């Protein structure tokens, strides 16, 4: 008996070869009808035929779908056959919407089939062609200008298909059928090599030329999928130090590496099975791996750290360059200042990056949206996202509840920021934006939010969440949007947004309560003190601060974050008089401040007069103080450096020491006594790595000693740890061990950064629920 089905698919169903899959499956079961992309990234399927065949067809769609496809919903409606179709076709895309929420896949790393095409000398059109892609790989988010996802709505619109590519594009049985970025060396984008004076460099083989230049010590700017990188040798100290000098603020900040394959990576780093799966995934993030000892690459790749960021090639450009490199890895780092978004326009790259690079490799395909490389590390033996960008965005976070008609926006805080839009039962974070402290980065945040709104078909907002700090540029943007859309504005405490982000990341229901340990560097507190070591009794709509680190004084405000010996002086001043503190600093730490002895005098005067000093409960500040006290790191040249270096030192330590603290009262962790015991151990010439490890473990235990009894007393069975300090493997693992030993569930971030990159999602959810 003939029947008819209408199927509406929502989720990741455009841009991954889904329609050809549906077409082939329908033909297999001798069905008639069509499959069509819709204007909201959904897909509509209408099929007629024998009912038993239709049932098999539906089963195949559910079980045999392309590996990148993801159904958020799969709605089937049975109807009477109308016999209106003569065949099954892939219909022209429609601007109409099927309803619900669908979204595009992220940029997808080049697949093995396309790599093989590039390696094949018999494939004249694609041999060594860097922009080779197919229906299941290649750029997506960085190229699309609007929905539906069709070639005219991408930056490939400027590259009309040649007859051969057009034939593949129109053949439903070809893997390049409706592959929107497909092209070849006849019709696709072209690469051009320039010197840093803007003059074209003629060469017979551009990749051999670049490989030779890198190995000879040159720095190359390379325009890629979502931005421009700088590449240089990873073994040549001179090249790397030149790169650090040119980058300006990269005195010791680690550089990422890119290697051709896992065998190359294994020559300089160890890889666990989890890390291997991340490196090989279609997302191709940077993964922080443990260095081998001895480390065969330059010490200047990642100075003073136990790990190094590594990725495998995710585009044809990277792969073809690495084919010409004999070294196991090259450096690949962003070709822009730290506070400026990645360069994407060719003229801008030539004018702004020419002082950074000796040569520039550019292509003529427009990048519509920037996307930095994503970064992951293992903490407590689980993957934790540090930077969520290329390979993830625009995938959403699924919510365990429905916001119904409320559409909300979170604009993020100041550092390592993102934006986020909450819609129905999804929250969509933007790509990593960075520090919102320049007009350029603010513009990038705004354009990313508006692009996401466009892809989601959103024209208005009901609620907007921003940080409680009154002076953030992101707060100014929130106020602008609030006025534009007549939306309610909710200023949210920084660490509470962290806690809610952790809750949605763990898919907790709306009525759940947790204990959230939130530890980071800085966040404006509800009492106008700088918070950063907090323990909350948290729900989605309320929080109670049940504990925190002891307040310490930051002399010189932000200068104390750059030169952590200032925090050392502040803490020591609680025990020693000014003369004693001066003697300690001048004899043991005279090189810890750029102003030397003179600055020590000024520092102590500031403390005595209580001039330009601020209170803080920051975990980052106390870890930085220990780092400086142990002479591990005297200057923060990148975000979190003193604490990161301290963790690297602690990784070498043995748990042979013991610090004993008085019983916790009023939920306040006594960091002064803890610091003094570490300092006494240092004065008694104990191993500094052992001191660092013991400090980490003791601090973790103090957090647990407040959180666990409170949770048990209030019948709360979940304790979570989030904030930037949750990237610290030692502290996270110890808290998790204590929580699990108490029979409670331990929560940590999974799909969202535990640092400030996850805050926008928390802000968006808090604002949406407060607006009800």
Image (cartoon, rainbow, N blue to C red):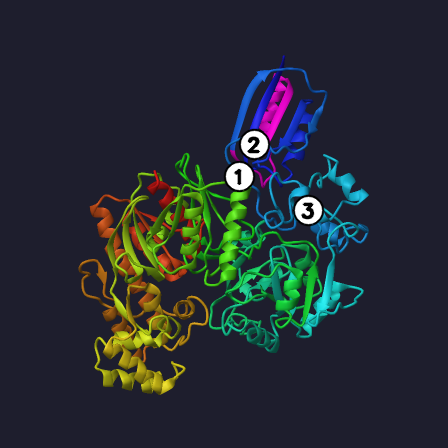
**Residue positioned 25% across, 75% down in the render:** 610
Q: Work out which quarter of the rendered image holds the C terminus and state it.
A: top left
Q: Mark 2 points at which residue?
A: 97
Is residue 84 positioned above or below 721 on the image? above
In front: 609, or 432?
609
**Residue positioned 43% across, 69% down in the render:** 641
Instruction: Identify the disc placed on residue 181.
Output: 3
Give the image location of residue 98, x and y in percent.
Answer: 55, 30
Mark 2 touches mark 3? (CB < 8 Å): no
Q: Name the residue under label 1.
A: 457
- The residues tagged by marks 3 and 1 sit, at their Cα atoms, a distance apart of 23 Å
Q: Does the magenta stretch include residue 414?
A: no
The answer to whether one can see residue 55 in this image is no
Is residue 615 positioned above or below 153 on the image? below
Q: Nearer the viewer, mark 2 or mark 3?
A: 2
Along the polypeptide, which appears first: circle 2 or circle 3?
A: 2
- The residues tagged by marks 2 and 3 sit, at their Cα atoms, a distance apart of 23 Å
Q: What element carries label 1?
A: loop
């Amino acid at each position: 008996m003939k029947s008819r089905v209408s199927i509406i698919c929502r989720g990741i169903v455009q841009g991954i070869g889904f329609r050809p899959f549906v077409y082939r499956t329908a033909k297999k079961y001798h069905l008639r009808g069509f499959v069509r992309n819709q204007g909201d990234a959904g897909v509509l399927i209408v099929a007629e035929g024998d009912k038993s065949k239709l049932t098999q067809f539906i089963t195949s769609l559910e079980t045999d779908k392309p590996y990148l496809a993801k159904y958020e919903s799969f709605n089937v409606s049975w109807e009477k056959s109308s016999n209106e179709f003569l065949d099954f076709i892939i219909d022209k895309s429609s601007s109409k919407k099927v309803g619900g929420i669908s979204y595009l896949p992220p940029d997808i790393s080049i697949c093995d089939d396309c790599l093989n095409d590039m390696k094949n000398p018999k494939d004249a059109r694609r041999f060594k062609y860097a922009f080779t892609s197919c229906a299941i790989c290649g750029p997506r988010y960085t190229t699309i200008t609007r929905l539906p996802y069709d070639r005219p709505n991408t930056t490939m619109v400027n590259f009309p298909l040649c007859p051969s590519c057009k034939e593949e594009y129109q053949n439903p049985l070809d893997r390049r059928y409706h592959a929107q970025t497909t092209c070849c060396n006849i019709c696709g984008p072209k690469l051009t090599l320039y010197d840093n004076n803007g003059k074209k460099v003629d060469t017979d083989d551009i990749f051999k030329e670049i490989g030779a230049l890198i190995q000879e010590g040159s720095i190359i700017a390379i325009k890629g999928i979502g931005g421009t990188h700088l590449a240089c040798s990873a073994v040549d100290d001179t090249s790397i130090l030149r790169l650090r000098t040119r980058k300006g603020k990269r005195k010791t900040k680690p550089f990422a590496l890119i290697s051709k394959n896992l065998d190359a990576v294994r020559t300089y780093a160890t890889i666990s099975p989890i890390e291997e799966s991340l490196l090989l995934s279609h997302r191709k993030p940077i993964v922080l791996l443990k260095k081998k000892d001895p480390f065969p690459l330059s010490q200047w790749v990642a100075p003073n750290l136990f790990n190094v960021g590594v990725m495998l090639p995710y585009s044809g450009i990277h792969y073809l360059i690495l084919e010409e490199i004999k070294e196991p890895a090259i450096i690949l780092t962003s070709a822009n200042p730290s506070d400026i978004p990645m360069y994407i326009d060719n003229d801008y790259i030539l004018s702004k990056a020419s002082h950074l690079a000796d040569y520039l490799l550019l292509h003529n395909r427009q990048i519509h949206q920037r996307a930095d490389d994503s970064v992951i590390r293992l903490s407590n033996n689980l993957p934790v996202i540090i930077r969520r960008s290329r390979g993830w965005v625009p995938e959403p976070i699924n919510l365990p509840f429905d916001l119904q008609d409320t559409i909300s926006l979170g604009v993020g805080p100041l550092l390592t920021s993102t934006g986020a839009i909450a819609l129905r039962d999804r929250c969509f974070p933007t790509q990593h934006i960075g520090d919102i402290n320049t007009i350029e980065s603010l513009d990038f945040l705004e354009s990313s939010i508006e692009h996401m709104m466009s892809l989601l078909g959103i024209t208005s907002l009901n609620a907007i969440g921003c940080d409680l700090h009154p002076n953030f540029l992101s707060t100014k943007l929130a106020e602008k949007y609030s006025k534009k859309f007549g939306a309610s504005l909710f200023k949210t405490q920084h660490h509470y947004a962290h806690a809610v982000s952790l809750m949605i990341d763990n898919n907790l229901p709306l009525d759940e309560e947790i204990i959230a340990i939130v530890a980071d560097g800085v966040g404006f507190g509800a009492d106008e003190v700088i918070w950063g070591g907090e323990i909350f009794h948290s729900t989605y709509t309320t929080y109670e601060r049940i504990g925190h680190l002891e307040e310490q004084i930051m002399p010189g405000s932000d200068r104390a974050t750059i030169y952590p010996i200032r925090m050392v002086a502040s803490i020591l001043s609680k025990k020693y008089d000014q003369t004693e503190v001066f003697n300690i600093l001048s004899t043991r730490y005279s090189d810890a401040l750029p102003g030397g002895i003179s600055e020590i005098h000024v520092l102590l005067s500031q403390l005595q007069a209580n001039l330009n000093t601020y209170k803080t409960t920051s975990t980052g500040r106390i870890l930085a103080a220990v780092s400086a006290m142990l002479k591990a790191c005297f200057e923060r040249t990148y975000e979190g450096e003193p604490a990161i270096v301290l963790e690297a030192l602690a990784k070498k330590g043995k748990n042979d020491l013991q610090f004993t603290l008085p019983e916790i009262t009023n939920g306040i962790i006594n960091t002064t006594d803890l610091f003094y015991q570490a300092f006494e151990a240092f004065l008694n010439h104990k191993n500094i790595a052992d001191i660092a490890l013991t400090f980490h473990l003791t601090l973790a235990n103090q957090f647990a000693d407040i959180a666990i009894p409170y949770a048990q007393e209030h019948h709360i069975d979940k304790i979570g740890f989030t904030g930037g300090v949750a990237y610290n493997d030692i502290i996270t693992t110890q808290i998790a061990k204590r929580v699990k030993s108490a029979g409670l569930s331990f929560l940590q971030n999974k799909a969202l950064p535990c640092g400030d990159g996850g805050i926008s999602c928390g802000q968006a959810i808090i604002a949406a629920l407060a607006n009800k």
